[in-house]
Image: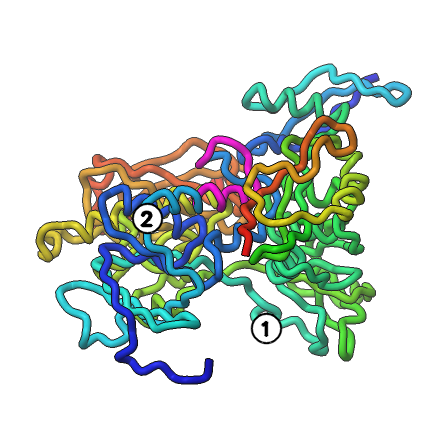
Amino acid sequence: MTSTIPATAAVAHAYDVVVIGGGPAGMGAAIAAQQAGARVAIVERDAHLGGILRQCIHPGFGLEHFKEELTGPEYAQRLINEVAALPIDVHTGAMVIAIDGDADTVGGGAHRVTCMSEEELLELDARAVVLAMGCRERTRSEIKIPGSRPAGVFTAGLAQRYINIENLAPGRRAVILGSGDIGLIMARRCALEGMEVEGVYELMPYANGLYRNVKNCLEDFGIPLHLSTTVTRIIGDARVEAVEVSRVDEHLSPIPGTERVVPCDTLLLSVGLIPENELSTKAGVELDPRTRGAKVDESLMTSVPGIFSCGNVLHVHDLADNATAEAQRAGRAAATWALRESDREDESQDAIAVEAAGLAGYAVPSRINGVDALVKIWFRVRAPIECGRIRIISGDETLFCGKPRAFKPSIMESVPVTPAMLKRAQGRITLSIESIEEDAR
Amino acid sequence: MSTTERFHCTTCPSECLLAVEVERDAGTALVVDVNGNRCPRGEAFARQEITCPMRILATTVPVTGSDIELLPVRTAEAIPRALHADAMVELRRLCVDAPVRMGDIVLPNILDTGVDVVASLDADEV
């Protein structure tokens, strides 16, 4: 189609809750919101619901949410079947281009979600919006690998899409940079499909993915994992011909003289994920620089009243089950907000700010409004700790001190904060993860 | 003479580090003791892992007449890891027709394991 669609052709619908994104978070939020009595729509830009789970064909999903081990597509299909059994409107093949893009037309505390599909422009009026757009992979340009710019450099998830959805082979001999779960899963997938996987290289001195993936994806296939080593140059004209790898020192700087040239035609990058928040920021949602997701309160509401965030667009989860569980909370909260009787804002007691300190990389939520219910604070450590503990501090007072134990950056965790602790907090609490060995020194 | 082998349990996200005391003798392995597991599944996993490691195999097969090109499939249960390469050869010959529903058997009793290969996703007919 080449004709432009006049604005008056927009098709308008009204909902209590509009969920943006139809993956494990979006579907979880939509189901929970509908079950809480809301009229709900999901907007998904792909032709099908399921999100990235459709290409995660491996098992390891569902142990929490469905109490059995499922593959990604099975996990997706079960949620798709639940959505299909409920009166939830699903707009697939539709991409949200703005939330409250034309502020003049939005009134009464409502939001307007503007979507575009091949056929039409859709305007969805929503009393509440749930952001569930997931995340995007970091690319070569974000880690700045020197060298030429040939074909054959892929993010691991793109290669996964080629192999598992589009029936395309990314190459014949691959080097994988980054030992995150997607990189490990793709090492196995490439090997099973007959590609040669020369090795996985990891900048840090430890594997970033789950042990199960190191074991099942590398050890099972005899694929070596090179720690404290990174790709320092990409070589090749039209196509990747080799990469240069180097050992790194304790400051993560390449050590001169340790360079080694590894012939390959494919470089897969599994170097981290970034919440996809362009839409959110354009709608005025304030982001946390640590998570690159929205700043939310304990009900997962962002800085914009009536806009909620959950799943990987809020912070990167390691398990789809956790994303779904969080999304169910967001969906229920969005329904409650949408169906509340008055537009009056909550009697404002000052929110308690939540901060991360020590080895805690971040804390979600970043503010707590109510002190009458238990709140879980989610966090992830920045580096592995053999023996550390959680401490929750407000002013000079320690509100909670956990038992000594190990912490791993590959595992997102939560710590409960009780009403008693919140009532003692003075406007601000700090979640700190402290290494106990360091204290003793 | 027994040796201690250390590996992580992969049964659940807790990933307990197991210390497994094994007596190996002329191609046979006898598990003497399992430590480090926080639940009984860890012990069962350790014994299986030493004698015959079992894994679920997941891959894709082409599907015709659908709006998706590849159908994700899996073995309904874990099969011996040693059979995965042969199973991939079998599955590469396979092509299925839409419609397919999640759980439908696409290849029964793969390599006489008694385990079926089933669809992981619906493939609607178009």
Instruction: Give the amino acid type for the residue marked by disc 1 in the picture.
Output: Ser
Does the stretch in magenta take in A70?
yes
Instruction: State the residue at coordinates (55%, 64%).
Output: A138
Left or right: residue A259 versus residue A383 is right
Chain letter of the residue beneath label 1 in the structure image: A
Secondary element type, mark 2: strand
Residue A256's quadrant in the figure? bottom right
Residue B36, image x and y in percent? 61, 24
Chain letter of the residue beneath label 2 in the structure image: A
Left or right: residue B112 versus residue A373 is right
Work out whether residue B21 or residue A67 is closer to the camera in this orientation and state it: A67
Residue B69, image x and y in percent? 63, 57
Does the stretch in magenta take in A83?
no
Q: Residue furthest right?
A: B26
Residue A421, image x and y in percent? 24, 38
Instruction: Give the amino acid type for the residue marked by disc 2 in the picture.
Output: Thr
Left or right: residue A161 versus residue A430 is right
Work out whether residue B100 or residue B47 is closer to the camera in this orientation and state it: B100
Magenta span covers which residues?
A65-79
Which residue is denoted by mark 1 in the rendering? A141
Q: Residue furthest top?
A: B32
Q: CA distance from mark 2 to mark 1?
A: 34 Å
Are circles 2 and 1 on residues that touch, CB within 8 Å?
no
Which residue is denoted by mark 2 in the rendering? A430
Instruction: State the residue at coordinates (72%, 78%).
Output: A148
Residue A4's quadrant in the figure? bottom left
* Mark 2 on the same chain as mark 1: yes
